[in-house]
Image (cartoon, rainbow, N blue to C red):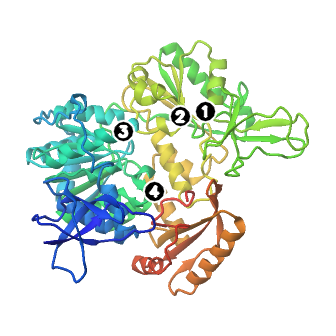
């Protein structure tokens, strides 16, 4: 018998799609096998049985699993290839765990307890019951649950999960990162006990392989919780997909195969006719627009706890230095609030989405600037180690005592990051217990590792980046201070305004959750009148949505057009310029396609060389994909369809 098989690996430049092999076994679509490819043996996925070809074929080496993949995962491979122009081997490889062909030694400590359902969900309030009724009544597979912070979206997740499990089907709950959603995971574990399987990046390849194997062979209903890769869990009886914090950028896979998890989840849900629920307090404008057109937006606009009082919000203009009489980084009013919290044994959160001590090191005499020799990006001062570090490639160097160019002692540091704020806080409040959470923390010092201590009030002041903005519910938190709210607004990206609004809304939402009788937010900004800041302070998503929709319509940006980003990388700038100009000329000749002027990428230089990019727009996705498909394949060219940002290459 003869079968078409998708190899799950590419060998060299050979990225073939489907190959034909022979086997005496009766195989089904989705069977995972080991096949010869050139001089290697690679895992592959059986597509279908075919008639004997008129050319010589090699035999399948081995059947790796008796149980085939669920049909929806086989369809997913072809969708990832056609919708995002990924190669079939790269799409197949993302479906399978690393080392799927290896025989793993079973370790008792790595067993997953796939036991019976022990559900004890919380009762729903009136607003939540109505939202659930509307979800069940909405005919489209994908529903957008737009719920303000603290409205109880989690309760709806729990109830829908319980109903799905009792019907004998499995649930996949996708979260941006396990570490950022500790509370949600904890609630699900308390509610459903041993029915849960966690998937996360800190697991070894062997552990993830064993988990995948158990799910493939299990017939019991499961709850699988994890980041975007959990969507590929090989469950046979999938009945519900939930995406929490659906606006998060981590749901877009930047590396090959590139894809949007939310769009892939929608495809799977429509394929097997189940519900995909996307929950968020700040929906992406494109997602809200598309869901609204299909009448698939379900709104939760009431706080779950009736006693929850909206926080008092104070906008502090950074241009008016009279607001900063005691300290250059913290306004006088914020310092007063922190002092009151310390006396009342309440907590303060200081947010700034920039780590390190100072993002700019320059010479005030000649203008020299400390740049990464690889990336040409500013080096960030880390005062605790007193080194300059590149946050893109990791390059590190000592801080020069004198300017390398003019040799004068005029080297100064501009701007500030979380490490500097930590130093300032400790100066102002020497007796306070302070913790900082950002990407510079050791594993043992992450918010995930220290969450219980933070929640129990063992720290008075917590400082950090967006790690602190996501889903954090601290009973003793009384004040949020945002050091510079407009820090991300000036980035050269169409998504900068949307991301700023989302981040501010999430941070503000950490207080006013019904735990305390009063709460305050201090928003320090150079642009107090900017729509992203004004609407975030009012928790007015719909007005911001209308504002941004008008901007996008004028600029011909999503959801009113389709985008693709093309990045070219070569060792020298001359070669990349020559090739990007040639590519630009070819694309400009295609009718119905808008092509930007060639520009350097945001991270123009790396260890691979120089990167320049083009942005393509088209009112037709089919036309856009057709143009991209016509391009000659090259390892120097990277294509991103539907890019969520223009800053990454």
Q: Is residue 460 above or below residue 197?
A: above
- Give the mark nearer the N terminus: 1 vs 3: 3
Alpha-carbon span between mark 2 and mark 3: 15 Å
Alpha-carbon span between mark 4 and mark 2: 23 Å
262 relative position to 119: left or right: right
Alpha-carbon span between mark 1 and mark 4: 29 Å
27 relative position to 285: left or right: left
Q: Determine the image quadrant of residue 155.
A: top left
Circle 4 — which element? loop
Q: Which mark is residue 255?
A: 4
Determine which residue is flagged by label 3. 178
Judge by depth and name the residue closer to the eye, 39 or 576.
39
Judge by depth and name the residue closer to the eye, 52 or 193.
52
Q: Is residue 583 above or below residue 217?
A: below
Q: Determine the image quadrant of residue 271.
A: bottom left
Tag 4: Cα neighbours inside 10 Å, few (<14), some, or many (≥20)? few
Q: Is residue 292 visible?
A: no
- Give the mark nearer the N terminus: 2 vs 3: 3
Q: Which mark is residue 388?
A: none
Residue 475 locus on image (x, y percent): 39, 25
Q: Nearer the viewer, mark 4 or mark 2?
A: 4
Q: Determine the image quadrant of residue 188.
A: top left
Circle 2 — which element? loop
Circle 3 — which element? helix
- Give the mark nearer the N terminus: 4 vs 3: 3
Circle 1 — which element? helix
Q: Residue at x 46, y 56 (%)?
A: 254
Quadrant occupied by the C terminus: bottom right
Q: Nearer the viewer, mark 1 or mark 4?
A: 4
Q: Which mark is residue 418?
A: 1
Q: Residue at x 55, y 55 (%)?
A: 497
Q: Is residue 120 visible?
A: yes
């Amino acid at each position: 018998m003869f079968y078409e098989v998708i190899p799950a690996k590419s060998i060299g430049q050979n990225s073939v799609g489907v190959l034909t092999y022979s086997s005496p076994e009766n195989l089904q679509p989705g069977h995972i096998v080991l096949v010869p490819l050139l001089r290697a043996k690679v895992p592959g996925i059986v597509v279908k049985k075919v008639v004997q070809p008129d050319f010589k074929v090699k035999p399948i080496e081995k059947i790796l699993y008796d149980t085939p993949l669920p049909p929806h995962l086989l369809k997913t491979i072809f969708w990832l290839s056609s919708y995002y122009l990924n190669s079939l081997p790269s799409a197949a490889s993302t479906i399978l765990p690393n080392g799927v062909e290896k025989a793993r030694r079973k370790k008792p400590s790595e067993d997953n307890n796939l036991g019976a359902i022990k559900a004890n969900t919380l009762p729903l309030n009136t607003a939540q019951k109505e939202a659930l009724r509307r979800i069940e009544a909405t005919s489209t597979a994908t529903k957008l649950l737009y719920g303000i912070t603290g409205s109880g979206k989690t309760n709806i997740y729990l109830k829908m999960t319980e109903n799905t499990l009792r019907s004998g089907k499995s649930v996949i709950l996708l979260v941006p990162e396990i570490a950022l959603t500790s509370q949600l995971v904890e609630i699900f574990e308390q509610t459903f006990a041993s029915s849960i399987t966690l998937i996360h990046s800190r697991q070894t390849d062997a552990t993830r392989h064993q988990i995948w194997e158990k799910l493939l062979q299990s017939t019991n209903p499961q709850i699988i919780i994890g980041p975007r890769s959990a969507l590929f869990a090989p469950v046979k009886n999938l009945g519900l997909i939930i995406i929490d914090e659906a606006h998060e950028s981590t749901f877009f896979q930047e590396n090959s195969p590139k894809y949007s998890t939310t769009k892939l989840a929608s495809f799977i849900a429509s394929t097997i006719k189940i519900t995909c629920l996307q929950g968020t307090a700040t929906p992406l404008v494109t997602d809200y627009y598309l869901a609204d057109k299909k009448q698939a937006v379900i709104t939760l606009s009431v706080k779950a706890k009736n006693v929850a009082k909206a926080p008092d919000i104070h906008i502090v203009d950074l241009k008016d230095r009279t607001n900063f009489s005691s300290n250059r980084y913290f306004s006088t009013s914020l310092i007063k609030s922190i002092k009151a919290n310390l006396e009342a044994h309440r907590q303060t959160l200081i947010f700034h989405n920039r780590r390190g001590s100072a993002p700019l090191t320059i010479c005030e005499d000649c203008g020299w600037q400390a740049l990464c020799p690889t990336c040409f990006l500013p080096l960030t001062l880390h005062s605790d180690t007193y080194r300059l570090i590149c946050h893109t490639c990791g390059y590190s160097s000592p801080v020069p005592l004198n300017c390398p160019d003019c040799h004068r002692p005029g080297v100064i540091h501009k701007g500030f990051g979380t490490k500097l704020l930590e130093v300032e806080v400790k100066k102002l409040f020497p007796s306070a217990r302070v913790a900082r959470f950002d990407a510079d923390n050791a594993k043992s010092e992450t918010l995930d590792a220290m969450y219980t201590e933070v929640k129990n009030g063992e720290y008075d002041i917590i400082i950090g980046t967006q790690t602190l903005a996501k889903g954090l519910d601290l009973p003793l938190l009384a004040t949020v201070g945002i050091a510079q709210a407009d820090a991300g607004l000036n980035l050269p990206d169409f998504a900068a305004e949307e991301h700023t609004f989302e981040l501010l809304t999430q941070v503000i939402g950490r207080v006013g959750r019904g735990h305390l009788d009063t709460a305050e937010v201090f928003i320090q900004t150079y642009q107090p009148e900017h729509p992203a800041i004004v609407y975030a302070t009012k928790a007015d998503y719909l007005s911001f949505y209308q504002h941004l929709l008008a901007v996008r319509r004028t600029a011909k940006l999503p959801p009113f057009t389709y985008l693709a980003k093309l990045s070219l990388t070569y060792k020298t700038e001359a070669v990349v310029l020559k090739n990007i100009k040639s590519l630009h000329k070819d694309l400009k000749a295609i009718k119905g396609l808008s092509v930007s002027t060639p520009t350097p990428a945001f991270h123009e230089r790396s260890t691979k060389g120089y990167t320049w990019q083009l942005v393509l727009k088209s009112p037709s996705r089919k036309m856009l994909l057709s143009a991209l498909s016509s391009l000659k394949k090259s390892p120097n060219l990277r294509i991103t369809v539907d890019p969520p940002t223009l800053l990454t290459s």
